[in-house]
Image (cartoon, rainbow, N blue to C red):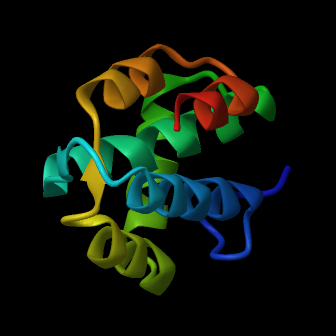
């Protein structure tokens, strides 16, 4: 089983798409550190569940490991302050698939 804590994992691409979409939207409010963390965590969770990793402790552990990588730090830096709407955040929180996640943004 592949670990999503690796910087080359596919969910990094989805996270980058989130940033681009939010930046292009031009409305909403500047994303906070907490909101960026939520986006990263949700993207990682969806990716892990797609790999049949469902244990909450394992998901939290792997998400924390990914967050601590250079790409995770870079994501947080790039995300912070980008425009995002509350409806997009609410939609992301409800998403259970990558397609749903992408559709939110």
Q: Residue furthest right?
A: 1
Residue that extends furthest to the top in the rendered view of this protein? 94
Which residue is rendered at x = 46% and y = 51% of the image? 63
Count of numbered circles on the image:
0
Residue sticking out furthest to the front:
26
Position of 77 with respect to 93 (left or right) is: left
Instruction: Tell me residue 30's x, y (percent).
Output: 16, 55
Left of 71 or right of it: where is 49?
right
Q: Position of residue 78 (x, y in %)?
A: 35, 76
In which quarter of the view is residue 79 placed? bottom left
- Left or right for 61, reference 12: left
Instruction: Answer above or below: position of 2 versus 68.
Output: above
Q: Nearer the viewer, residue 65 or 17?
A: 17
Q: Residue shown at 44%/19% (left/top)?
A: 91
Above or below 92: residue 20: below
Residue 43 % position (x, y): 55, 42
Q: Position of residue 66 (x, y in %)?
A: 49, 64
Compared to residue 86, the image places residue 96 above or below, namely: above
Q: Nearer the viewer, residue 64 or 92?
A: 92
Q: Nearer the viewer, residue 10 or 78?
A: 78
**Residue shown at the point (74%, 29%) measured from the top left:** 99
* Residue at screen point 22% across, 66% down: 80
Instruction: Say above or below: 23 vs 93.
Output: below
């Amino acid at each position: 089983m592949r670990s999503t804590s690796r910087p080359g994992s596919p969910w990094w691409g989805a996270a980058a798409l989130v940033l681009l979409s939010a930046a292009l939207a031009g409305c909403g409010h500047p994303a906070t550190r907490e909101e960026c963390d939520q986006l990263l965590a949700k993207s990682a969770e969806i990716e892990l569940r797609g790999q049949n990793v469902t244990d909450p402790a394992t998901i939290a552990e792997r998400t924390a490991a990914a967050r601590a990588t250079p790409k995770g730090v870079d994501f947080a830096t790039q995300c912070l302050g980008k425009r995002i709407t509350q409806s997009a955040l609410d939609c992301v929180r409800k998403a259970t698939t990558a397609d749903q996640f992408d559709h939110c943004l």
